[in-house]
Amino acid sequence: MAWIAQWGQGIVGFVRDHEAWAAPICFALAFGESLAFVSFLLPATLVLVAVGGLVGQAGLAFLPVFVAAAVGAALGDWLSFWLGRHFEDRVAGLWPLSRHPGMLVRARSYIDRWGAVGVFLGRFLGPLRATVPLIAGLAAMPALPFQAANWTSALVWAFLVLAPGAFGVDAVRGWFA
């Protein structure tokens, strides 16, 4: 797990040195974090929190970084939804789902029970973040409720991940000034 810390520190260091890349990097991290299967290999949430801190420290504009992260997250979920819809049950044979078939059953019952609310809430539950959209596609959830939940949750998630660092730094600095 040491490689994860080194990887995260490397990205944060790169953003610190090349501030113009903050928004594209946040887009890529949020996209990967939300994309089925890739998210298991790309633990990006903590890196995004750290980049939010850089936004506050370096005085970067919050809006472009926020929009990039939200759009990346929503597009990652959208692609996962499409993969589930397009490849249907063939997805079950892919790792890690092939090793944990019960996960698909639980996720499917979650979507059947909660629908769009489940898609919205799934964004905030780490292990479900990238699997819920995939399962929503497998379950043939209607696209409009999925996309409504997807885009609104992506906006809220991006704000919650980036804002504490972006705005908290100035607030704390003001308390001690």
Image (cartoon, rainbow, N blue to C red):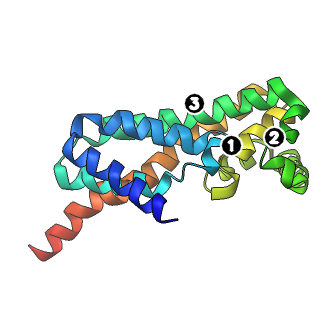
Q: Which of marks 3 and 2 is in front?
A: 2
- In the picture, measured across the screen, residue 121 lies left or right of residue 23, that is right
| Amino acid, disc 1 | Phe
Residue contact between numbered discs 2 and 1, judged by CB atoms under 8 Å: yes
Q: Is residue 28 above or below residue 103?
A: above
Where is residue 86 drawn, in percent x and y? 81, 23
Task: Please state which of residues 145 and 54 is positioned toward the viewer in this rendering.
Answer: 54
Q: Marks 2/1: CA distance?
A: 9 Å
Q: Which residue lies furthest to the bottom in this view?
A: 176
- The residue wearing badge 1 is 37
* Residue appearing at x 44%, y 39% in the figure: 69
- The residue wearing badge 2 is 94
Indicate which disc, 2 or 1, sits on the residue closer to the N terminus: 1
Where is residue 174 drawn, in percent x and y? 15, 68
Label 2 crowding class (10 Å Cα cut-off): few <14, some 14-19, many 20+? few
Q: Report the disc number at residue 75.
A: 3
Q: What element carries label 2?
A: loop
